Image (cartoon, helix red, strand yellow):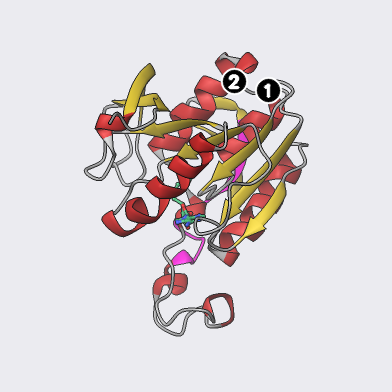
Amino acid sequence: MRLFPVPALPEIRIYTAHPGSGLRRLVEPGGDDEANEDTSEPKPPYWAYAWAGGTVLARYVLDHPGTVAGRRVLDLGAGSGIVGIAAAKAGASAVIAAEIDRNGIAAIGLNAGANGVAIAIAEGDITADPPPAVDLVLAGDVFYGPEVARRIIPFLDRCLAAGIDVLVGDPRRADLPRSRLRLLAEYKVQDFGEPTGAAAKPSGVFSFEPELH
Ligand SMILES: C[S@@+](CC[C@H](N)C(=O)[O-])C[C@H]1O[C@@H](n2cnc3c(N)ncnc32)[C@H](O)[C@@H]1O
């Protein structure tokens, strides 16, 4: 892994995958047994990349520091930690990064250190837990599949009910709960998985709103 500025986020550098990183062994059965002892399936190294949803949410926070300044922030599904790092740089009073992947947790620690910010870690799946003691949840690209969306939406609803604001960054993936979102801003960024040089596509920053009855 090499420390590189994140595209569209020159203020933030993260340890980034490159062809010599050898990350493939993490997704091969038996390739990372210790780090995945809680599951039979190796986890893809989502933490090794800045996803479009997290990138635009981090961009929004850096461009609108008043969103986070002096507030306690949870970066839900933190991956590399880019969103939490942006929140810390923009003046959040405390940042917690929630991540289920132990390799991701290691990456968040390294990336926070590389950017000179402090981030606390909530390890494991907190979506069945009561809402944490924060003022704002930032959810960058966490609707990447139906199962994860099914867990996260009720958690975000409980956060709203507890008076916690929720912002979502997403390139409008299939499982994004669009009816619950109000668009705040849009940025064109490249997504993870797109070939180098591919055109940047619009991704949104949204406020997650209470369900209308
Ligand atoms: C698509 S990645 C986005 C990472 C980062 N937010 C970004 O935008 O670059 C989604 C991340 O959410 C994590 N994740 C999935 N379900 C989770 C849960 N219930 N609690 C915490 N993290 C979760 C995954 O391990 C993965 O690292």
Residue 20, given in percent of the width and then of the height, sits at 49, 60
At x 30%, y 28%, the residue is 212
Task: Identify the residue position indicated by label 2 in the image.
Answer: 62
Any atom of ligand 1 within 8 Å of the CB at mark 1?
no
- Dividing the picture into quarters, in which one does residue 62 lie? top right
Nearest the viewer among 88 and 66 is 66
**Of the residues shown, which amino acid type is indicated by label 1?**
Ala
Q: Residues within 10 Å of mark 1 (few under 14, many from 20)?
A: many
Q: Position of residue 71 (x, y in %)?
A: 70, 27
**Residue 75 rendering spot, x and y as whole percentages:** 58, 41
Numbered label attached to residue 164: none
Q: Is residue 151 above or below residue 137?
A: below
- Label 1 and label 2: CA atoms lie apart by 6 Å
Left/right placement of residue 213 relative to residue 78 reads: left
Vertical placement of residue 144 versus 183, above or below: below
Count every numbered label the image shows and give the total.
2
**Secondary structure under the numbered disc 1 in the rendered image:** loop
Seen at 33% across and 54% down, the residue is 150
What's the magenta region?
Answer: 12-23
Query: Is residue 1 in sight in this rendering?
Result: no
Q: Are marks 1 and 2 in contact (CB under 8 Å)?
A: yes
Residue picked out by circle 1: 90
Is residue 82 something one can see in this rendering? Answer: yes
Where is the C terminus found, in terms of image quarters?
Answer: top left
| Label whose residue precedes the other's in the sequence (1 or 2) | 2
Q: Residues within 10 Å of mark 2 (few under 14, many from 20)?
A: many
- Name the amino acid, label 2: Leu
Q: Hey, which quadrant is residue 113 in on the image?
A: top right
Q: Residue furthest front?
A: 213
Residue 22, magenta (yes or no): yes
Is residue 121 on the magenta stretch? no
